[in-house]
Image (cartoon, grey):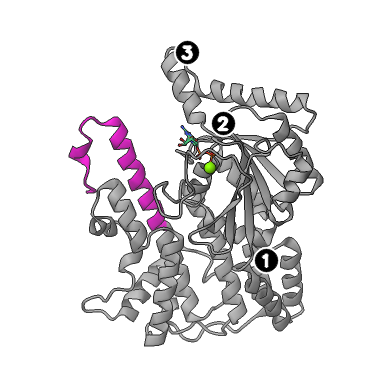
Amino acid sequence: MGQVNSDACKKEDNGDLVSSFTEYFKKIKTESQIISPETIRSIELHLKKGNIQGANSIIRDVLKNIDDIPINIAVTGESGAGKSSFINALREVAHDEADAAEVGVVETTMKITSYKHPKIKNLNIWDLPGVGTLKFPPKDYLKKVEFQKYDFFIIASATRFTKHEIDLAKVITLMKKNYYFVRTKVDFDIDNEKKCKPRTFDREKILQRIRNSYLDTFRENKIDEPQIFLISNHNLSDYDFPSLVDILIKDLPAQKRHNFMLSLPNITEAAIQMKYKTSKQLLWLEALKEGVLAAFPVLNSINNSELEKLEANLNHYQTLFGVDDKSLELISKDCQVPVEKLKEKLKSHSLLTNKENETLGEYLLNCLESFLSVSSGLLATGLYFGKIFYFQFLFLDAVTEDAKVLLREAYSKEYLKFNSPTATDHDNIK
Ligand SMILES: Nc1nc2c(ncn2[C@@H]2O[C@H](COP(=O)(O)OP(=O)(O)O)[C@@H](O)[C@H]2O)c(=O)[nH]1
Ligand SMILES: [Mg+2]
């Protein structure tokens, strides 16, 4: 693709810039945009008037806050409801890790504990004792737990929701905050039914029956029919957890979505895709902020300082997408596959290692050429970004693909473990 190597391309053109920006953000559903529709409109307006500086200054302001914006999630429910397990699952922390929330501990005090997300530094999940534990009226309870600081409340239960919890939900609404009822341990209900009534077992019917039983309680207590999410903390990808995540993202203000989406565990391809989409939006904004070039940059020479930047960027993406060395070691232990075998399946780990008979610059350029030829849009925009951004787009694609490959591998290992009596015969990745 001669286009990539070419040095002299189109002139800078505001028309292109406006339409590319608008086109790009129009394609993203409003509920997953990481900047508000008003901000998008005002950037567009500046671009239309040819005021690139004005547009850049808005983008700069947005980007300044996006990484540091705090997210505080409250998880409340009676002892045994599965709060600690839920918090560990959200943070992708195993129960036996040092900073895990302790599971199976009976709470009798008003102790509130906060858990930092291991990768998203300003995301905290708060483990709150149940409103019924100390028999506080909901208003006093909310005052005690400093309700203002939370973005939303998860009200968890493994059985029925008590009158205290339903009243709490009403007061949370009065305080203009969102709450979500989460019914944990549905795997338990499903397994029980399967064992007790193997012949008439119908998973969907059971889930619907559980859901309906709650809707009746909510109706009786005169609260607007809220959604209830049935989940298993032992298997987040199953049941309603993915729908809960979709709703949470939609309900969050745009500027909080980026960090929240990045914090999600890699439980499904859809979750990985969400991380990809949010990172790509951010990269577009960063590239625009740095300024658009009049010509396509020369890509096949990379100096040391650029290489350092690229390495840091690739490591950052690998960590966020759970394909860094540390994560691979954990996966290797779980799946009992050597790290080196896993790496053979992944793209991102070989991107910055030296190649024989080829300089790193030439190698990356080749990767980039094939990447740009399939990822329509980046060149079709008529916009040219700084050199580093093309590599970042390439890295982002590679780590996304790697995360999906690992998810499939992990799933196939689990599948083999549970379904094949001779699982060990198949236990090596081919
Ligand atoms: N089967 C199943 N067990 C769960 C689930 N969530 C939690 N548990 C178990 O329920 C018990 C109490 O969980 P924990 O997270 O400590 O509840 P907490 O007291 O609300 O923090 C522990 O033995 C957990 O392993 C779930 O979704 N499914
Ligand atoms: Mg607990």
Residue at disc 3, CB closer than 8 Å to ligand 1 = no
Q: How far apart, in angstroms, are the residues tagged by discs 3 and 1?
A: 53 Å
CB-based contact (under 8 Å), mark 1 and mark 2 = no
**Residue 145 visible, this angle:** yes
Q: Secondary structure at mark 3?
A: loop
Counting from the top left corner in percent of width and height, residue 170 is at 78, 38
Drawn side of residue 365 relative to residue 149, left or right:
left
Residue type at mark 2 is Ala
Tell me the CA gap for discs 2 and 3: 24 Å
* Residue at left offset 56%, top offset 40%: 107
Please report the bounds of the magenta region as a residue range: 401-430
Above/below status of 81 relative to 430: above
Mark 1 or 2, which is nearer the eye? 2
Under tag 2, what secondary structure?
loop
Residue drawn at point x = 44 percent, y = 83 percent: 6
Foreground residue among 181 and 160: 160
The residue that label 1 is drawn on is 22
Residue 13 sits in quarter: bottom right
Q: Look at the numbered disc 2 and say if its residue's Cβ is closer than 8 Å to ligand 1.
A: yes
Q: What's under tag 1, amino acid-wise?
A: Thr
Q: Earlier in the sequence, mark 2 or mark 3?
A: 2
Inter-mark Cα distance, 1 to 2: 46 Å
Residue 361 among those drawn in magenta: no
Pick out the residue farthest to the left.
425
Mark identifier at residue 158: 2
Q: Which mark is residue 200?
A: 3
113 w.r.t. 43: above or below: above
Prevalent SS, magenta region: helix
Query: Residue 2 is drawn in which quadrant?
Result: bottom left
Left or right relative to 8: residue 44: right
